[in-house]
DNA sequence: ATAAATGTTAAGAA
DNA sequence: GTTCTTAACATTTA
């Protein structure tokens, strides 16, 4: 489920536990989501520490705890975060539960493509991203042009999915962006004209900002004019003129677009 | 039952 | 050395 906008929503779910101490940690240590992580240190250090802050960059989240402890979370394809009352009993896919006296903070992920990382230190961990966020002013025309140049032969759809250039963009956001910018998804990055490049940047900023505002706050639906409502159903149509959408695998992912709005 | 799902990454090819 | 493509990962749902 989670791309930039959904990640923002899930990150906020744990806000309820801000300021409170962790009194117990439950986790399924052999599950794939803990690959490469020291679960023993995670458990030992987090118990007794206070949850102080959370941030998100792209699809990555970083939760800060007192005592120089940091928890990195990635939701993968099916991860969610939520809170329950303290008497909550964890289910099969609830791989990490941080218990506080009043609240349980839960990370659930049926498909296990998500990831939990633990870090100790005064500074944020080395794996914490430094790429410009796509909704910020640092995401400049120059930056976009440079990034596309480095991936000039790949289809633009595949380039949009690269997290080191477009952090937070996933499959639905990429299709939404290309549809708004009126660019065919299989176009090679190098083939974009200057106006297309600027339309691409504009659409990226629009979709990320509006997505964060609408979905990121309470998971409400974007307006019916958005492509997102059409892209998963068979028989989906272009919101602009109701023409049937095209569908193909591009950049390894199912891609939906309108051949009229986004000509070759 | 078979395919596909809003993601990442290792491995091999170009 | 870098960039590009594909397969694999684990589980649920249509």
Image (spheres, coloured by chain):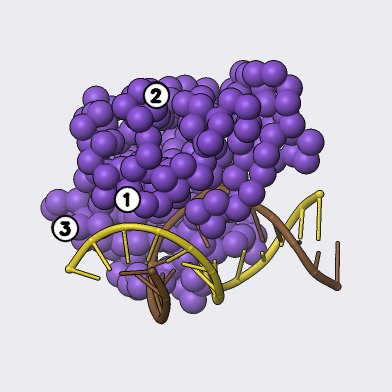
Chain colours: A purple, B brown, C yellow
Q: Are marks 3 and 2 in contact (CB under 8 Å)?
A: no
Q: Nearer the viewer, residue A221 or A248?
A: A248
Q: Position of residue B14 (x, y in %)?
A: 38, 69
Q: Which label's residue is closer to the chain start, 3 or 1?
A: 3
User: Does residue A51 sit above or below A228 in this rendering?
Assistant: below
Horizontal relation, residue A194 to residue A98: left or right: left
Q: Nearer the viewer, mark 3 or mark 1?
A: 1
Query: Which residue is depicted at the point 23% across and 36% down?
Result: A143
Q: Residue furthest left?
A: A122
Q: Secondary structure at mark 3?
A: loop
Q: Which label's residue is closer to the chain start, 3 or 2?
A: 3
Q: Chain of mark 2?
A: A
Horizontal relation, residue A24 to residue A225: left or right: left
- Examine the rendering and report whether any part of residue A140 can be seen: yes
Q: Position of residue A40 (x, y in %)?
A: 35, 73
- Between the C-alphas of marks 2 and 1, the distance is 18 Å
- Between the C-alphas of marks 3 and 1, the distance is 35 Å
How packed is label 1: few (under 14 Cα within 10 Å), some, or many (20 or more)?
Answer: some
How packed is label 2: few (under 14 Cα within 10 Å), some, or many (20 or more)?
Answer: some
Q: Position of residue A215 (x, y in %)?
A: 53, 28
Q: Quadrant of residue A98?
A: bottom left
Q: Quadrant of residue A34?
A: bottom left
Which residue corresponds to mark 1?
A151
Rendered image: mark on residue A199 = 2
Q: Secondary structure at mark 2?
A: helix
Q: Chain of mark 3?
A: A
Q: Secondary structure at mark 1?
A: loop
Q: Are marks 2 and 1 in contact (CB under 8 Å)?
A: no
Which residue corresponds to mark 3?
A121
User: Does residue A241 sit above or below A215 in this rendering?
Assistant: above
């Amino acid at each position: 489920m989670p791309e930039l906008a959904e990640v923002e929503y899930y990150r906020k779910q744990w806000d309820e536990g801000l300021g409170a101490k962790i009194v117990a940690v439950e986790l399924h240590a052999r599950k794939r989501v803990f690959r490469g992580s020291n679960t023993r240190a995670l458990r030992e250090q987090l118990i007794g520490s206070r949850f102080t802050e959370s941030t998100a960059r792209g699809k990555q989240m970083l939760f800060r705890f007192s005592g120089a402890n940091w928890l990195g979370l990635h939701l993968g394809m099916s991860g969610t975060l939520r809170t329950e009352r303290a008497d909550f009993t964890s289910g099969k896919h609830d791989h990490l539960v941080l218990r506080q006296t009043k609240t349980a903070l839960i990370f659930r992920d049926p498909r296990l493509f998500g990831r939990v990382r633990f870090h100790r230190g005064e500074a944020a961990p080395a794996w914490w991203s430094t790429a410009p966020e796509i909704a910020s002013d640092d995401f400049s025309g120059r930056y976009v042009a440079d990034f596309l140049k480095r991936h000039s032969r790949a289809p633009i759809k595949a380039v949009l999915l690269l997290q080191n250039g477009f952090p937070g963009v996933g499959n639905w956001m990429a299709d939404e962006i290309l549809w708004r910018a009126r660019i065919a998804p299989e176009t090679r990055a190098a083939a974009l004209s200057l106006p297309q490049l600027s339309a691409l940047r504009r659409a990226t900023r629009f979709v990320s900002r509006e997505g964060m505002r609408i979905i990121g706050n309470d998971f409400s639906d974007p307006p019916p004019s958005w492509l997102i409502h059409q892209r998963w159903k068979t028989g989906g149509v272009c919101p602009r003129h109701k023409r049937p959408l095209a569908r193909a695998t591009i950049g390894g992912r199912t891609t939906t677009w309108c051949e009229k709005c986004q000509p070759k």
